[in-house]
Image (cartoon, rainbow, N blue to C red):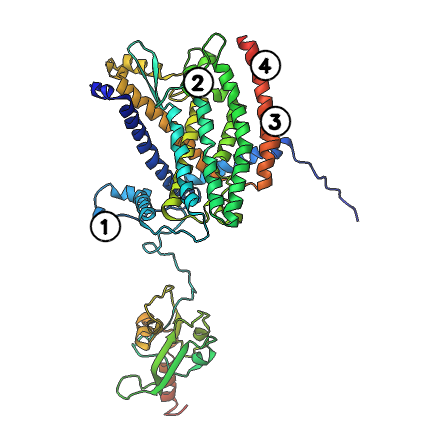
C-alpha cells in the first residue's frame, strides 16, 4: 500500500523522509526546554510553569493536565520568540551575527541523517534499519558534522564584537577540541569489536546495533556492560560537547553573562537553544545506539526475538508487518533517548558547574589518558578474543 | 594542656574522582523529584497567619459598635515614619458615644509610609488600633494607598473587649455620687 511512495523519485523520497525527521526533532527539542523547566521544578519541589492556557480552551476536560504540564506555556514562549522584536546591537558584524544561529542549526539537524532510529523485519527475517542514509562512514559523519557546530559558537562570539561573547566563544572552542579527542577514542573499542576479522569494515551505527542483537551471552549484552569505561567516557564527553552542566563553559551565566549568546535575543536566540537540544537528542541517540542496544528492548532480548515472541503469543502476523515493527522499534528507541535526556537534566540540576581550569584538567589529564588506556586494553583483549 | 593531634587524611581515590559524591547527590535529587511540591499556589492558597502577626494597621470598634479612638494622637506622635495623620474633633451629642469627649474627625494611615512596626498598637491607651492579618495592599495611585477612617474601621471591625474601661469608670462615678 506504500507503493506510491516508493515510485516517487529518490530525491523526493529523501526530502519527505528528511522533513519527517526534522518535523519530529524540532518540536521535541523545543519541548525539551519545557521538560527541563519541569524537571528542574520537580527536583526543587516546585510545581513549575502551570498557569498558561488559551481562554477558549478553559473548561474542556483534559486541558487541565496539559495546562499543569506547561504545554501551553511552551507554545506561548515559542510564539513570543517568533513575534518579538529582533534586537540587533549597533556594534556587531551584521552578516556573521545573523549567520551564526543558522550555522548552529544546520549541523544539529544534519547529523540525524546517519543515525538509525528503528528497524523492521523483511520477509526473510532479516533486520533492516530505518534511517535516512545507511552509509558506511556512520559514526565518522556524526563526529565530523557535529564538530562543525562549534563554528556557530565561535562565529557568534566573534561577530558579537563584545568581550563576554568573545570569551564564551574562545572557551567553547577550547572545550570542544579537548573533549572531542576523548570521545572519539572512547568509541574506537566498540568499532574494533564490531568489525571482526573476515567481515567487511564499516563504521555504520546500524552495524553496532546489529552486533548487540546477536544470540548468546556476548552477542546479546549491550556495550554498556562489556565496555563500561567507554560508555562512561563517552557520556562525560557528550556532556561537554553539548555544553551541558556541569560543563557549560561557553554559556556560564555566572561569569560571562550569557557567554556567546549575550547579544542575541528573540528568534535568533531561540535557534541556539533549539540547536543545543537537537545536539543533545542526536548525541543521546548515538549513545543509545552504541551502548544501550539501540532499538532492542532489553539486553539479551533483541527486537526480532520480541516481535517473533509476540507473533507466537498472539498468533497474528500483524507483529511481523514492517510498519508495526517499525513503529514498535522507533518507540523503543525514542523512549531510550528521552530517558537519557532526562538523565542529562537530572545531572544538570544536581551537579554544580566546574571551573574553566577544572574542565581543562579533567579533559586533558584524566579523560584523555583514561580513554587511551581503555583503547589499549580493549585492543589487546579483542585481539585475544577474536584473533 | 594536652595537645590532640588531629590527623589530616588525604582524599581517597574515590573521593578524588568526585563520582561517589555525584552519585549521592543524584540519589538526593531523585528522592526530591518524587515528592509533592512544597510551595503554595499563592492567590488561590493563602499561608496560615500566625498569632501576633503584624499586618495592615486598622481601627476597631467596641462591642457596642462605638468608636474606641479618642484621638489622643499618641500613635501619630510615636509613629516612626510619620504615616499616621489624625484630625481631632469633638463628639457630636446624641450619637451614643458621649462616654468620651473626643473622636477623630479624620484618621489617615499612609500605607506607603507605614513600616508595620506596631508601635501605634503598643502605645494606644484605648486599644483602638490593631495590626491585623492583612498583608497585601495594592492600589493604582498614591492616593489610593492612604487608608481613610471608614476603610480603617471596615478592615478592623469589632474586637471583643476585656476591660470595658468606660463602663467601669461610669459605674465608679455613680457609686461615688457623681465624682471620682
Q: Chain of mark 2?
A: A
Mark 1–mark 4 contact, CB under 8 Å?
no
Side (left or right) of A92 relative to B68? right
**Secondary structure category for the residue under label 1:** helix
N-term-proximal mark, 3 vs 1: 1
The picture quadrant where one finds residue A75 is top left
Residue lying at the far right of the rendered structure: B1
The picture quadrant where one finds residue A33 is top left
N-term-proximal mark, 4 vs 3: 3
Whole-angstrom CA distance, mark 2 to mark 1, is 50 Å
Image point 36% across, 50% down: which residue?
A86
Q: Is residue A174 visible?
A: yes
N-term-proximal mark, 1 vs 4: 1
Q: Which residue is mark 4?
A: A380
Give the percent coordinates (x, y) of residue B160.
35, 71
Q: Is residue A249 visible?
A: no
Q: Select label 2 or label 1 by which is in front.
A: 2
Whole-angstrom CA distance, mark 4 to mark 3, is 17 Å
Q: Which residue is mark 3?
A: A369
Q: Which residue is mark 2?
A: A208
Q: Select label 1 or label 4 by which is in front.
A: 4
N-term-proximal mark, 2 vs 1: 1
Whole-angstrom CA distance, mark 1 to mark 4, is 66 Å
**Secondary structure category for the residue under label 4:** helix
Give the percent coordinates (x, y) of residue A173.
52, 37
Q: Which residue is mark 1?
A: A55
Q: Looking at the picture, do discs 2 and 1 lie on one chain? A: yes
Amino acid at each position: 500500500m506504500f507503493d506510491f511512495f516508493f515510485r516517487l523519485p529518490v530525491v523526493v523520497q529523501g526530502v519527505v523522509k528528511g522533513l519527517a525527521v526534522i518535523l519530529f526533532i524540532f518540536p521535541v527539542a523545543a519541548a525539551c526546554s519545557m521538560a527541563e523547566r519541569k524537571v528542574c521544578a520537580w527536583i526543587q519541589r516546585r510545581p513549575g510553569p502551570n498557569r498558561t492556557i488559551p481562554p477558549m480552551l478553559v473548561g474542556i476536560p483534559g486541558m487541565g493536565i496539559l495546562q499543569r504540564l506547561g504545554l501551553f506555556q511552551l507554545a506561548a514562549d515559542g510564539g513570543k520568540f517568533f513575534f518579538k522584536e529582533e534586537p540587533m546591537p549597533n556594534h556587531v558584524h551584521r552578516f556573521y551575527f545573523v549567520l551564526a544561529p543558522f550555522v548552529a542549526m544546520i549541523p544539529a539537524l544534519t547529523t540525524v541523517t546517519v543515525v538509525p532510529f528503528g528497524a523492521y523485519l523483511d520477509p526473510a527475517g532479516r533486520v533492516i534499519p530505518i534511517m535516512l542514509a545507511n552509509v558506511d562512514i556512520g559514526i565518522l559523519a556524526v563526529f565530523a558534522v557535529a564538530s562543525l557546530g562549534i563554528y556557530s559558537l565561535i562565529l557568534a562570539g566573534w561577530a558579537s564584537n563584545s568581550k563576554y561573547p568573545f570569551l564564551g566563544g574562545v572557551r567553547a572552542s577550547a572545550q570542544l577540541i579537548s573533549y572531542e579527542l576523548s570521545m572519539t577514542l572512547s568509541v574506537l573499542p566498540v568499532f574494533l569489536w564490531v568489525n571482526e576479522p573476515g567481515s567487511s569494515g564499516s563504521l555504520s551505527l546500524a552495524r553496532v546495533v546489529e552486533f548487540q542483537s546477536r544470540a548468546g551471552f556476548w552477542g546479546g549484552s549491550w556495550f554498556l556492560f562489556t565496555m563500561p569505561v567507554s560508555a562512561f567516557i563517552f557520556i562525560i564527553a557528550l556532556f561537554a560537547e553539548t555544553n551541558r552542566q556541569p560543563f557549560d563553559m561557553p554559556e556560564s551565566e555566572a561569569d560571562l553573562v550569557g557567554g556567546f549568546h549575550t547579544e542575541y535575543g528573540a528568534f535568533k536566540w531561540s535557534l541556539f537553544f533549539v540547536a543545543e537540544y537537537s545536539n543533545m537528542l542526536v548525541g543521546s541517540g548515538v549513545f543509545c545506539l552504541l551502548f544501550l542496544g539501540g532499538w532492542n528492548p532489553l539486553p539479551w532480548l533483541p527486537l526480532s526475538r520480541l516481535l517473533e515472541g509476540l507473533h507466537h503469543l498472539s498468533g497474528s502476523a500483524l507483529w511481523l508487518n514492517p510498519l508495526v515493527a517499525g513503529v514498535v522499534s522507533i518507540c523503543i528507541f525514542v523512549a531510550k533517548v528521552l530517558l537519557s535526556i532526562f538523565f542529562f537534566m537530572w545531572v544538570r540540576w544536581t551537579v554544580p558547574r566546574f571551573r574553566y581550569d577544572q574542565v581543562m584538567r579533567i579533559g586533558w589529564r584524566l579523560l584523555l589518558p583514561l580513554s587511551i588506556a581503555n583503547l589499549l586494553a580493549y585492543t589487546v583483549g579483542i585481539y585475544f578474543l577474536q584473533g | 594542656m594536652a595537645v590532640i593531634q588531629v590527623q589530616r587524611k588525604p582524599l581517597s581515590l574515590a573521593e578524588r574522582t568526585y563520582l561517589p559524591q555525584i552519585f549521592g547527590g543524584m540519589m538526593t535529587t531523585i528522592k526530591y523529584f518524587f515528592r509533592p511540591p512544597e510551595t503554595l499556589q499563592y492567590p488561590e492558597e493563602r499561608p496560615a497567619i500566625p498569632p501576633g502577626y503584624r499586618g495592615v494597621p486598622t481601627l476597631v470598634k467596641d462591642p457596642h459598635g462605638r468608636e474606641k479612638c479618642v484621638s489622643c494622637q499618641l500613635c501619630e506622635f510615636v509613629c516612626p515614619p510619620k504615616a499616621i495623620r489624625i484630625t481631632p474633633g469633638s463628639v457630636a451629642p446624641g450619637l451614643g458615644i458621649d462616654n468620651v469627649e473626643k473622636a477623630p474627625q479624620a484618621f489617615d494611615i499612609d500605607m506607603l509610609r507605614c513600616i508595620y512596626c506596631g508601635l501605634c498598637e503598643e502605645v494606644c491607651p484605648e486599644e483602638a488600633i490593631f495590626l491585623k492579618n492583612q498583608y497585601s495592599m495594592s492600589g493604582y495611585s498614591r492616593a489610593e494607598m492612604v487608608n481613610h477612617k471608614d476603610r480603617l474601621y471596615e478592615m478592623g471591625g469589632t474586637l471583643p473587649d476585656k476591660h470595658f474601661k468606660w463602663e467601669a469608670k461610669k459605674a465608679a462615678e455613680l457609686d461615688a455620687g457623681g465624682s471620682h
